[in-house]
Image (cartoon, coloured by chain):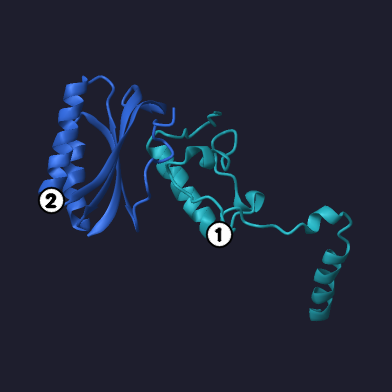
């Protein structure tokens, strides 16, 4: 079981309940693949430094996951098909850093 | 000819006139309590890019080779996620 950090960007146009449902579908997808979400963090609406798909703002979500390495490919494929997720990144880490991360907006 | 080469390198060290040049260059990331390079820590990464958003070379920032590799990977990940720009520098 490897530790992964996932950062997911969601388009700003969708309403909040559509956004929550797509995030829940991601959680369900990870649990189906016998993965475990350690904890997650919502960085909220941030403005992007360049336009992605003509959007200049995006909702950021950060997940710390423990999952088999070869399950990530299928998760990426479903994320690519879903048009609510405009960008995602999975990073393998040795051990999870403690939260809050530098970008979390609790401090503000 | 071999002797001449040895002589030439020694003379370069001798004629350092200002005392500032032999200040010991240290890598800001391999000290005892130096910050951890992380693609989410954009305030730290911003210090190592130029005004046009390019990664400054390690010969200027004195960063060691392994840490410069980590730094460039983190900057490229931050750029991919839209946290950092490709073409200019965002001042906080």
Q: Chain A is drawn in which colour?
A: blue
Q: Is residue A16 above or below residue B66?
A: above
Say which mark, if any, is on residue B65: 1
Say which mark, if any, is on residue A33: 2
Chain coloured cyan in this rendering? B
State the image quarter where residue A56 is shown: top left
* Front position among marks 1 and 2: 2
Q: Which residue is drawn at 47% across and 33% down?
A: B85
Alpha carbon distance from label 1 to label 2: 38 Å
Left or right: residue B92 compared with residue A43: right
Q: Residue at x 80, y 55 (%)?
A: B21
State the image quarter where residue A46 is shown: top left
Q: Which residue is drawn at 56% across and 55% down?
A: B33
Quarter of the image containing the C terminus of chain B? top right
Contact between labelled residues 2 and 1, with CB atoms less than 8 Å apart: no
Q: Position of residue A11 (x, y in %)?
A: 27, 25
Q: In this view, does A47 lie above or below B15?
A: above
């Amino acid at each position: 079981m490897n530790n992964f950090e996932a950062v997911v960007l969601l388009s700003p146009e969708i309403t909040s309940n559509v956004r929550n449902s797509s995030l829940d579908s991601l959680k369900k997808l990870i649990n189906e693949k016998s993965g475990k979400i350690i904890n997650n963090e919502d960085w909220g609406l941030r403005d992007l430094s360049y336009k992605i798909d003509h959007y200049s703002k995006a909702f950021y979500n950060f997940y710390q996951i423990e999952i088999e390495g070869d399950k990530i490919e299928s998760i990426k494929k479903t994320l690519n098909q879903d048009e609510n997720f405009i960008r995602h990144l999975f990073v393998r880490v040795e051990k999870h850093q403690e939260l809050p991360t530098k970008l979390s907006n609790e401090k503000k | 000819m071999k002797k001449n080469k040895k002589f030439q390198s020694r003379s370069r060290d001798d004629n350092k006139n200002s005392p500032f040049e032999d200040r010991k260059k240290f890598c800001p990331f391999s000290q005892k309590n130096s910050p951890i390079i992380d693609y989410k820590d954009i305030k730290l990464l911003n210090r190592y890019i130029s005004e046009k958003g390019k990664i400054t070379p390690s010969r200027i920032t004195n960063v060691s080779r392994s840490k410069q590799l980590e730094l460039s990977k983190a900057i490229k990940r931050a750029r991919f996620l839209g946290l950092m720009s490709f073409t200019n520098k965002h001042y906080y």
